[in-house]
Each structure stands twice: as structure tokens, then as C-alpha cells.
Amino acid sequence: MKYRRCGRSGVLLPEISLGLWHNFGGGDDRVQNVAIIGRAMELGICHFDLADNYGPPPGSAEERFGSLLKQEFAGHRDEMFIATKAGHLMWPGPYGDWGSRKHLISGLDQSLRRLQLDYVDVFYHHRPDPDTPIEETVEALVQIVRSGKALYIGLSKYPPALFNRACTLLAEAHVPCLLHQLRYNLLDRACEAGQLPAVKAQGTGSIVFSPLAQGMLTGKYLNTTALPAGSRAERSDSIFLDAAKVAADAERVARLHAVAEKAGIPLTQLALRWLLQRGEVTSVLIGARTVAQLEECAAAAGQPALDDELMNLLNAE
Ligand SMILES: NC(=O)c1ccc[n+]([C@@H]2O[C@H](COP(=O)([O-])OP(=O)(O)OC[C@H]3O[C@@H](n4cnc5c(N)ncnc54)[C@H](OP(=O)(O)O)[C@@H]3O)[C@@H](O)[C@H]2O)c1
């Protein structure tokens, strides 16, 4: 594994990190989970990304990971960089969501109990809150670091102006923003317009999620009439990808697949290497349901740069 410095911080992150949004919930196979985390550690993928609402059901990915840490990986805590987040709906009533001091501090306390940890390495505000003053959100994040419950602070999905303001406030409190977590893949390049330039201007790190567009950029859905059994688009407990979304992007994926075939590089690899070639990207945050998927993604790290002709073809799509 190759490691990249996260902005101007002391933190190095692996080029490929592992997210537990899917595949580590209450109904997922624990034995498979142990195998994936164990293989990740062997491959040098030491950064694990969670959030309070990951599962399903919400909370269960943290519970699963906490139990694995305690029972299977005890003694390895300091080799790992563990993230969690709050800011999406977690419990009923006015305090279970968004970005108030009340929500963030209660939310992290709940996460730490599920994870069976005293602190996380990075705590994110999971999404911007249009109604809470950014000063309050930032003060809560600063308080969390000062209390020792998180070592670093991250932001996720912030628009550029709010990201800049939050970075300024955090820097003034001597708790600099470590990194911005953004969606970025060959099918969704919206962050290039403002969020990535803001990351560059602020000098923070960035970690980009859904790099394979939830699996669409592996080519597994090229046959749009039959979704592969057990895949995210096929599973009824997975609500973020379905046949309609697969169909909507099918033509672009087919064109990208043709580019990959011509280059002699699997589309999965090409999609990840294209992201790693962006200077602003510190780490590419994948998901994996099996050890084989993890290994295929990990192999994208440390590869030579794609040539200009290939990059131009991909950028044109
Ligand atoms: N900040 C946020 O708001 C936010 C939002 C979304 C995600 N995230 C983070 O980003 C992480 C990654 O997101 P993601 O899961 O959407 O990433 P992704 O890497 O785009 O998709 C992962 C899925 O693609 C399929 N896959 C992966 N490698 C494969 C391979 N080699 N061959 C075939 N299929 C493969 C698997 O799905 P199948 O089940 O179909 O096999 C896998 O679960 C999440 O776990 C989470 O930590 C953050």
C-alpha cells in the first residue's frame, strides 16, 4: 500500500481506504466481515470509515466493527485510523439529526459506546445543516477534540463557501479541518466545480466516496436486464442503488467499459486509478462485500500514472 499525507497534517492515509456503509450491518455475515478486515490490514488498508447510521439497521455497523475490534483485532487499535460521523437522522425528536451541539455530542457518545472505544481518530460532521449556525457546529467539533473523544475533525458534503468558513473557524480554534469527504467518481464529477478547488485552497486532505458508483463502475451491471444475485442493486435491503439508477447510467458505463477494454485495464482499476491521479485526492474510499473485491480494489494503489491519451478519453465521458 502507498500512503499519502492528508493535507498539511501529520496523518498519512492509505491510497485505498475501506468504508463500512454496506456489508457490515446486523444481517451481514460476521465471518466474512472478519476476513475482509483482516485482509485489509494485511494489505495496508488501515483506515476504516464508519458513521452512526451505517447498517442496516442504523448503528449496527458500528456495533459489528466494535465487536470485531474487541474479539478479533484486539491489540491492533493503534495501527488503525477509525472514522465515524454524525449529522444524518439517528433518533426521533428534535435532537436526533443535523448539526446542533446537542446532536453532535450525544451522537458521538452513542457511537463510542457502540464501537466500544474511548475515542475515534476522525469525527465528521456528516452533512451541512442549513439551519444551525456554523459557529455552533464548529464549537461542538472543537469541544469534541478538546475532550479527547476524537483526534481530528472532518467535514462531509459541505458546499465550498460553508467549507471555507468552517475551515477558518476551526483553524482559529487551533483544531484544523483534517479532510473533506466527497462523492467523486467517473459518473459524478460535481465536486470538481467547487468543492475540490476549495480543498486545494484550504490545504486540507480529501477522501472520495463511492469511487465505483456503488459498483456500477465495475461493469457488473452491463447486462441491464438481469441484476447479479446478491449485488447492491439487486438486494432489497439496499435502498441507494436500484434497477432504475443502473439503467439511467447504462450507456455511459458501457462507453467507459469499452475504453477500459481497449486499454486492457479492468474498468474497476481504471475508475480507481483515474481518481488517484487527481492531486487533490488523498484517499479513495471503497466498499467491499467480499475479500476478492477488496483485493481487486487494493491493487489499484501504487500503479503508474495513466497516460494523457487515456485520461483524455475518460475525461471526455
Ligand atoms: N460521507 C457520505 O455521505 C458517504 C456516502 C456514501 C458512502 N460513504 C463512504 O464511502 C464508502 C464507500 O462507498 P460505496 O460503498 O458506495 O463505494 P463503491 O466502492 O463505489 O461501491 C462498493 C460496492 O461496489 C461493489 N464492488 C466493489 N469492488 C468490487 C469489485 N472489485 N468487483 C465487483 N464489485 C465490486 C460491491 O457491491 P456489491 O454488493 O454489488 O458486490 C461494493 O459493496 C462507504 O462505505 C462509506 O464509508 C460516505
Image (spheres, rainbow, N blue to C red):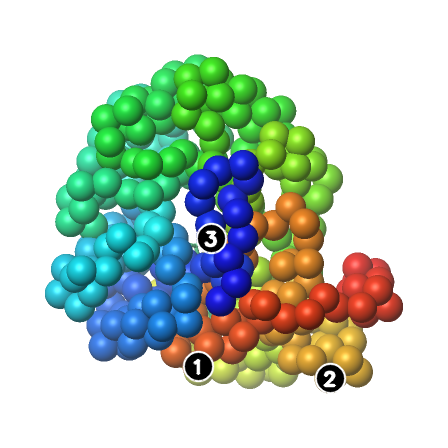
Q: Which residue is mark 1?
A: 292
Identify the amino acid type marked 2. Gly
Which residue is more in the foreground, 200 or 242?
Answer: 200
Question: Separation of disc 2 and disc 3 at Cα?
Answer: 29 Å
Q: Residue at x 38, y 30 (%)?
A: 98
Q: Which residue is mark 2?
A: 264
Image position, residue 196 (x, y; %) = 65, 40
Q: Secondary structure at mark 1?
A: helix
Relative vertical location of residue 57 with respect to residue 248 in this rendering, above or below: above
Q: Secondary structure at mark 2?
A: loop
Q: Residue at x 25, y 72 (%)?
A: 34
Dot 3 crowding, Cα within 10 Å, few <14, some 14–19, many 20+:
many
Which residue is more in the foreground, 106 or 250?
Answer: 106
Residue 261: image quadrant is bottom right
Q: Residue at x 33, y 50 (%)?
A: 82
Q: Which residue is mark 3?
A: 13
Which residue is more in the foreground, 250 or 117?
Answer: 117
Q: Confirm or reject: label 1 Cβ below 8 Å from ligand 1.
A: yes
